[in-house]
Image (spheres, grey):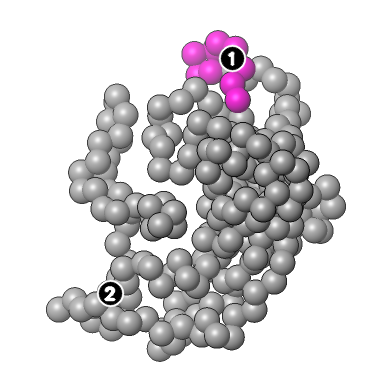
């Protein structure tokens, strides 16, 4: 039998701290701007970094012409150690605030990190995106590392804001935690077919 549970966490002991990053200008890969397709054709496409205006979380990954596109705003620091801490401490759902530039004061939230390029990805409204520019500074109220579920010592919680965590529909079944997926589907030759749509986590975060 599955029943809804009121998950208890140690959120009152989780430290909230500040980390900050700059909007990172898009860069050219070390191999050059041109890439080669599996058909042997050369192409140039938008990639990582900067501000992406017309791609956001929840969009189809097959709908746009891009290569490793990062939705929203991409943050990084020039100092490698500071950038590493920015990536480590930022958790999905954390509040982000623009500190400089024409969009100063605008608020958004962290949607994830991109390893390899070491970017922290942040969602902002389209109106705010058009006011931003590379090198604008964004402060993140980092909160979530150290979060734990009481009574489930063998479960490791990583990189999620405690407020967002509590919005997840977690159930208990046979002494185990059960969490629903955002979408369930299968890849087809012409795209992605949703078999059993469920409320996406993106909608939970935005609301």
| Quadrant in which the N terminus appears | bottom left
Magenta stretch: includes residue 43:
yes
| Quadrant in which the C terminus appears | bottom left
Residue 147 screen position, x and y as percent: 54, 77
38 or 170, which lies in front? Answer: 170
Cα distance in 3D space between marks 2 and 1: 47 Å
The disc at residue 43 is: 1
Identify the element where label 1 is drawn: strand
Identify the element where label 2 is drawn: strand
Magenta stretch: includes residue 196:
no
The main secondary structure of the magenta stretch is loop
178 or 126, which lies in front? Answer: 126
**Residue 24 in sight in this render:** no
Sequence-wise first label, 2 or 1: 1
The disc at residue 144 is: none
Instruction: Find residue 83 and report its image quarter.
Output: bottom right
The residue shown at (52%, 66%) is 160
The residue shown at (24%, 41%) is 194
48 or 34, which lies in front? Answer: 48
The residue shown at (73%, 27%) is 28
Residue 132 screen position, x and y as percent: 68, 38
Residue 38 screen position, x and y as percent: 50, 19
| Residue furthest out toward the right | 79
Which range is magenta?
Answer: 37-46
Instruction: Find residue 131 and report its image quarter.
Output: top right
Q: Is residue 93 left or right of residue 7?
A: right
| Residue furthest out toward the top | 41
**In the rendered image, the vertical position of residue 2 relative to residue 62, given as above or below:** below
Residue 163 screen position, x and y as percent: 47, 71
Q: How many marks?
A: 2
**In the rendered image, the vertical position of residue 86 relative to residue 26, given as above or below:** below
Which residue in the structure is indicated by mark 2? 171
């Amino acid at each position: 039998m599955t029943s809804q549970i009121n998950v208890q966490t140690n959120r009152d002991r989780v430290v909230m701290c500040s980390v900050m990053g700059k909007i990172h200008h898009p860069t050219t890969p070390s191999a050059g701007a041109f890439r080669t397709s599996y058909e042997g054709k050369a192409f140039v496409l938008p990639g990582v970094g900067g501000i992406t205006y017309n791609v956001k979380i929840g969009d189809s990954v097959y709908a746009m012409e891009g290569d490793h596109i990062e939705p929203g705003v991409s943050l990084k620091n020039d100092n490698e150690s500071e950038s590493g801490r920015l990536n480590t401490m930022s958790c999905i759902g954390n509040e982000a605030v623009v500190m400089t530039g024409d969009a100063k004061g605008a608020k958004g939230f962290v949607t994830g990190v991109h390893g390899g390029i070491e970017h922290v990805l942040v969602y902002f409204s389209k109106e705010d995106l058009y006011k931003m520019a590379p090198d604008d500074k964004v402060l993140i109220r980092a909160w979530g590392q150290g979060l734990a579920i009481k009574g489930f010592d063998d479960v490791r919680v990583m990189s999620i804001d405690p407020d967002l965590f509590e919005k997840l529909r977690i159930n208990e079944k046979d002494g185990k935690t059960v969490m629903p997926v955002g979408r369930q589907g299968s890849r087809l030759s012409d795209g992605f077919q949703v078999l059993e749509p469920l409320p996406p986590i993106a909608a939970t975060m935005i609301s």
